[in-house]
Image: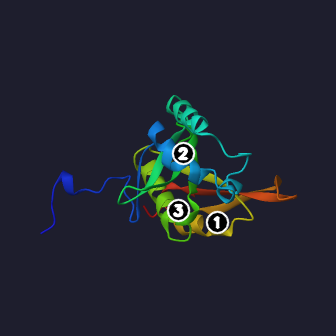
């Protein structure tokens, strides 16, 4: 018989395939090499190059002192860290924040990114009382666009020729999700 009561409730940070948890400096060792993959970096916008372990640790320290952003480790249900997602530019008055995510390449196309984004949004709406979560995605990243659409994000606009990557300008789409549109 399934457990009942408070201990049987699923954490708002547990997805179907992944779990989100607080980011710590100890995550630098397992995550920084995965983050420094050039294909991962290409999807992240204005991050120009891989960073050192010390740079990763400094990022963790800075974000922990900034109340306008929250970054969470994405880990498999058996505890293997595979990426980071978060909410940035948090505006408590307007009840909105900008979502961001990266997943290690060896976990692409397995549903982890979609599950992480769905879990992040459910947590943002339910626990942070957000009304709108938005994000930016390169027009050249159809995998990410499909994942965001599965979560319920809709394209709200396009920033034309927003980034210069691989010798050409590319557009960036603005996508948004309102709390009443969320399936979480």
Q: How is the image coloured?
A: rainbow
Q: Nearer the viewer, mark 3 or mark 2?
A: 3
Element type at mark 3: helix
Residue behind mark 2: 87
Q: Position of residue 122 (x, y in %)?
A: 44, 55
Q: Residue 139 at x, y = what percent?
A: 74, 63
Q: Earlier in the sequence, mark 1 or mark 2?
A: 2
The numbered dot on residue 145 is: 1
Q: Nearer the viewer, residue 94 or 153?
A: 153
- The earlier-in-sequence mark between 1 and 3 is 3
What SS does tag 1 mark? helix
User: Quick check: 73 above or below 90?
Assistant: below
Q: Nearer the viewer, residue 96 or 103?
A: 103
Q: Closer to the observer: label 1 or label 3?
A: 3
Q: How many marks?
A: 3
* Mark 1, other Cα within 10 Å: few <14 / some 14–19 / many ≥20: some
> Looking at the rendered structure, which numbered label has been put on residue 113?
3
Q: Quadrant of residue 93?
A: top right
Looking at the rendered image, the quarter that the C terminus falls into is bottom left
Q: Earlier in the sequence, mark 3 or mark 2?
A: 2
CA distance for labels 3 and 2: 15 Å
Between marks 1 and 2, how big is the CA–CA gap? 18 Å
Quadrant showing the N terminus = bottom left
User: In this picture, is 91 found above or below 125?
Assistant: above
Question: Relative to 169, is 147 on the left or the right?
Answer: left
Residue at (73% x, 46% y) in the render: 46
Q: Are marks 1 and 2 in contact (CB under 8 Å)?
A: no
Other-residue count near label 2 (Cα within 10 Å), few / some / many at <14 / 14–19 / ≥20 = many
The location of residue 59, given as percent across then percent down, is: 58, 36
Do we see residue 71 in this rendering? no
């Amino acid at each position: 018989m399934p457990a009942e009561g408070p201990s049987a409730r699923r954490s708002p940070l547990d997805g179907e395939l992944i779990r989100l948890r607080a980011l710590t400096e100890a995550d630098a060792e397992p995550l920084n090499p995965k983050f420094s993959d050039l294909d991962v970096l290409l999807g992240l916008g204005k991050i120009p190059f891989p960073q050192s372990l010390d740079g990763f640790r400094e990022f963790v320290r800075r974000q922990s002192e900034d109340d306008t952003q929250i970054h969470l480790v994405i880990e498999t249900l058996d505890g293997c860290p595979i990426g980071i997602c978060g909410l940035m530019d948090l505006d408590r008055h307007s009840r909105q924040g900008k979502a961001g995510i990266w997943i290690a390449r060896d976990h692409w196309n397995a549903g982890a990114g979609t599950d992480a984004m769905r879990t992040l949004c459910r947590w943002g709406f339910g626990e942070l009382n957000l009304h709108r979560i938005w994000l930016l995605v390169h027009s050249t990243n159809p995998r990410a666009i499909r994942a965001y659409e599965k979560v319920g994000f809709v394209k709200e606009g396009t920033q034309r020729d927003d980034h210069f990557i691989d010798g050409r300008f590319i557009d960036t789409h603005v996508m948004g999700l309102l709390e009443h549109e969320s399936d979480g």
